[in-house]
Structure formats: structure tokens, C-alpha cells
Amino acid sequence: MPRHSRRGDSGDAGIATVWAATAVAALVLVAGGMFWIGSAVLARHRAAGAADLAALAAAGRTHRGVDDACGLARGISERMHARLRTCTVESWDVLVQVEVDLPGPLATLGPARGRARAGPVQRLP
């Protein structure tokens, strides 16, 4: 008589460990994927925020000229760890585009981009 049949074993000793290890590995993979997706979303939000703030700041300086307004937009973007890609002034409206690099292996997909437009600033009396 086989040994496992005397004790009532079905020969599945240790299978729970294999299933548990597989489940843990799957959870680690899913968590890692969510981490990278979250990092990409964060970079996109940083790019949008940097573009908004740079456009607003530049709109307040358009009366001093395009170079001064876009110089301020560049300084704001750099302080927010973004690169100013373009800055144009069209009839008192400032249009900016900024880029933020994606982290880790996502960098091969290219940078996250943000665009914003801000109009003239009117001073209240």
C-alpha cells in the first residue's frame, strides 16, 4: 500500500506554498506597475502645473516685452523642475509649453508635456 494513502495524504503536500508564492509575486508585479503609472500621472500633473504658473507669471509681464515675459516663464518652469519648451505672446496672450521627464524606464516614452494660455492681467483700482 502506498505510503501517502495510509496517512490520508493525497500527495499535495506543499502546494499551498507554491500558490502563496505565486500570489505574492503577482501582487508585487501589480504594485510595481501601479507605482510606475502613478509616477507618470504625477509627472503629467507637474507639467500642467508648471505650465499654468509660468503662463500666469508671464502674462503679468507682457507689458515689459516678450523677452522679459518669457524669461520669467523659463525661471518659473525651472524652479518647478520642468523645461520651458516654447513661449509665445499673441496679442497679449501668453502660450507656454513645458516638459517634465518621466522617471525610470518610463523615460524611454518621452517627457510629460503641459500647455497653458494666460491672458492680460488687469489691475484692480
Image: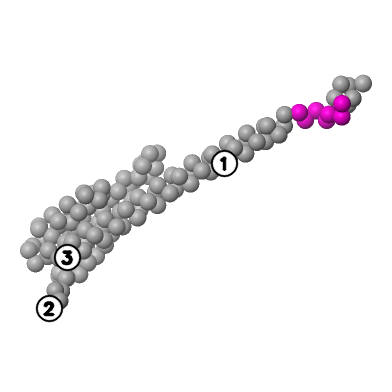
Give the CA distance from mark 3 to mark 1.
Answer: 48 Å
- Residue 106: which quarter of the image? top left
Which residues lie in the magenta part? 7-13
* 16 displayed left or right of 106: right
Q: Which mark is residue 9?
A: none
Alpha carbon of mark 2 to alpha carbon of mark 3: how far? 19 Å
Res 17 → quadrant: top right
Circles 3, 1 touching at the beta carbon (< 8 Å):
no
Foreground: disc 3 or disc 1:
1
Most prominent secondary structure in the magenta stretch?
Answer: loop
Could you tell me residue 98's position as x and y percent?
26, 53
Label at residue 125: 2
Tag 3: amino acid: Ala
Query: In the visual, does 77 lie left or right of 68?
Result: right
Residue carrying label 3: 59
Mark before the other along the chain sequence, 3 or 1: 1
